[in-house]
Image (spheres, rainbow, N blue to C red):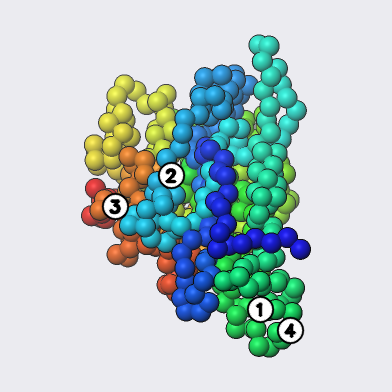
Amino acid sequence: MQELDLLHAQHLPYIPRPDLFLALSGGKTLSPHPRQLRRHRLRPPPAKGGAWCNTIENCSERKKKTYLGSSTLMGAVEFDGILSSDKQLNSDFYNWNKVVVRYCDGASFAGDTEAQDVDGSTIYFRGLRIWNAVLDELMGKGLARAKQVIHIAGVKLYSLGTYGLDKNNSGTVMWPLQTWLFRYVFQAILSGCSAGGLATLLHCNDFHALFPKEVSSKCLPDGGFFLDAEGLAGERYATIFSEVVQLQNVCEVLAKDCLAKKNRTECFFAAEIVKSIKAPTLIVNSAYDSWQIQNILAPADSYNGQSWSGCKSDIRNCSSSQIQVLNGFRKQFVDDVKVVQDKKGWGLFIDSCFYHCQLTEFPWSPWNSSSSPELGNKTVAKAIGDWYFERSQQVKQIDCEYPCNPSCS
């Protein structure tokens, strides 16, 4: 039997982050007994944002000229926000092992089709294979072994149906310890931002299925609840998603029960995906999602002159009539996300701040700072910790209309 010594386990090597987070953690000593055992938590890396490519031409551009398609252009990633190892900034997850998977396929790790040639260059649409390869790699490096043998102060615990300090302990005697181990020893989160948030939703069931039911594996999409909203000029984002789905052959990751009733494009939207997710999931999103307002509601070619330029760059610049339009967008968002409100183990943190992603320290996502959005007197960091560790009966908050929330500075 293979063994993993959690007291001296090394951090798993991480994959530089584009858009999906996975993590394996083991860090702080717990009490009460056994005092020497450290929590072993697996957290899939947050997926980083980067939209999608919907034509051969713009996919080729991403490959040649941007960090969204070329590993030679990917800079180093700073582990901040929910990825931070600073206990003061990230008290619940600072000592987790984190893995960040760089986003490079342009379809939220969902496509799988044959290579195509463009101007003498070959483009591969293999996002789904990348996702599967990452999981295989991580499982081979210890995720699978981590639940077989654990050392506590030099004493082995064997996973043989029941845990025991040695072969002679009975299941009856060891049941309390077994319960304690399953609760605190192995935990996992899959998270991602923007296109990585959508990837988190698409792959949540796959990820959850990797672990036995005793493992607390949950999903945390950030800014990934994209709407099929109508833009100012009457266009719908479903047109873009349809092109992505067709070009990259997005099919296998889509829920079979959805495909039985709807087309693939409809099943690629979060409002349909969440209906089939089995794992506990917390949706973090702004109902006034800045990226969606800038790119879905009011893209540059949908209005005349500069009429929406100031508003979509900063909600404080919006006129009263523009706020009414944004409130219509918010209403559709709230109506779509409410489908999960009664799902057991799920959570909602839907604020009215003009943000896109909120879990990492980009300029527009303050995480656990004095400028963090608050709902029910909780920052997003506190709400996530309370939901994941079940410190609160439920974490389901939907904010009122802008500008009601004073924490949205």
Check the picture and name the quadrant holding the N terminus: bottom right
Q: Amino acid at mark 4?
A: Asn
Mark 1 vs mark 3, foreground winner is 1
Mark 1 element type: loop
Q: Are marks 2 and 4 in contact (CB under 8 Å)?
A: no
Mark 3 element type: loop
Q: Residue at x 52, y 66 (%)?
A: 38
| C-alpha separation, residue under disc 2 versus residue under disc 4 | 45 Å
* Above or below for 336 versus 32: above
| C-alpha separation, residue under disc 1 versus residue under disc 3 | 43 Å
Which residue has dot 4 on it? 168
Which residue has dot 3 on it? 369
Mark 2 vs mark 3, foreground winner is 2
Q: Dot 1, how many residues are within 10 Å of its Cα: few (below 14), some (14-19), or many (20+)? A: some
| C-alpha separation, residue under disc 3 versus residue under disc 4 | 51 Å
Mark 4 element type: loop
Q: Residue at x 33, y 57 (%)?
A: 88
Q: Amino acid at mark 2?
A: Phe
Which numbered disc, 1 or 3, marks the residue that appears first in the sequence? 1
Which residue has dot 1 on it? 165
Q: Dot 4, how many residues are within 10 Å of its Cα: few (below 14), some (14-19), or many (20+)? A: few
Which residue has dot 2 on it? 79
Closer to us: 162 or 349: 162
Q: Position of residue 399 (x, y in %)?
A: 35, 58
Give the quadrant of residue 121.
top right
